[in-house]
Image (cartoon, rainbow, N blue to C red):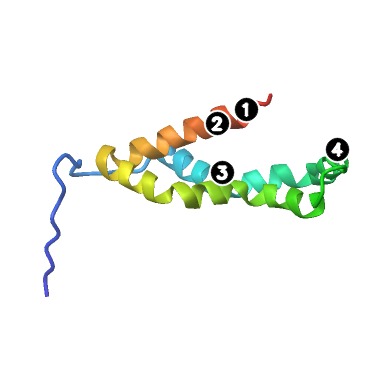
């Protein structure tokens, strides 16, 4: 049985991955795991700094889940935008915004 697939207009006929594509894919994987890894070591210091806040023992660990909470909350909006402007543009734009926001405290 031969299955024909339709190509979307505007898609290149021959796609070959290069180093830039690998960098983009690895960056997206790293972003999800890097945030909790970077935040984890400062949690005890955050608890000491906000010791006078009620329920701080529960609130500080919640900081680790915040990047995934934002991603979950915005997933439908990001999906709709990527359908309109293209997945690659949204992915690269998101990585640039992530890099800016990640280095802003520096």
On the image, the x and y values in percent for residue 82 come to 32, 43
Crowding at mark 3 (Cα within 10 Å: few <14, some 14-19, many 20+): some
Q: CA distance from mark 3 to mark 4?
A: 27 Å
Q: CA distance from mark 2 to mark 3?
A: 9 Å
Q: Residue furthest bottom?
A: 1
Nearer-N-terminus badge (4/1): 4
In screen coordinates, is 91 left or right of 69? left
Disc 4: which residue: 49
Q: CA distance from mark 4 to mark 1?
A: 22 Å
SS at badge 1: helix
Nearer-N-terminus badge (2/3): 3
User: Toward which corner of the image does residue 21 lie, by quadrant?
Assistant: top left
Is there a contact, CB below 8 Å, between mark 3 and mark 4? no
Nearer-N-terminus badge (3/4): 3
Disc 2: which residue: 99
In screen coordinates, is 16 left or right of 24? left
On the image, the x and y values in percent for residue 85 come to 27, 37
Nearer-N-terminus badge (2/4): 4
Disc 3: which residue: 31
């Amino acid at each position: 049985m031969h299955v024909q697939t339709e190509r979307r207009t505007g898609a290149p006929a021959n796609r070959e991955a290069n180093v830039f594509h690998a960098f983009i894919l690895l960056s997206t994987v790293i972003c999800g795991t890097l945030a909790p890894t970077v935040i984890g070591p400062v949690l005890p210091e955050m608890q000491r700094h906000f010791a006078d806040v009620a329920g701080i023992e529960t609130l500080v660990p919640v900081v680790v889940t915040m990047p995934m909470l934002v991603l979950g909350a915005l997933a439908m909006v990001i999906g709709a935008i990527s359908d309109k402007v293209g997945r690659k543009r949204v992915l690269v734009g998101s990585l640039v915004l992530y890099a800016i926001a990640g280095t802003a405290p520096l």
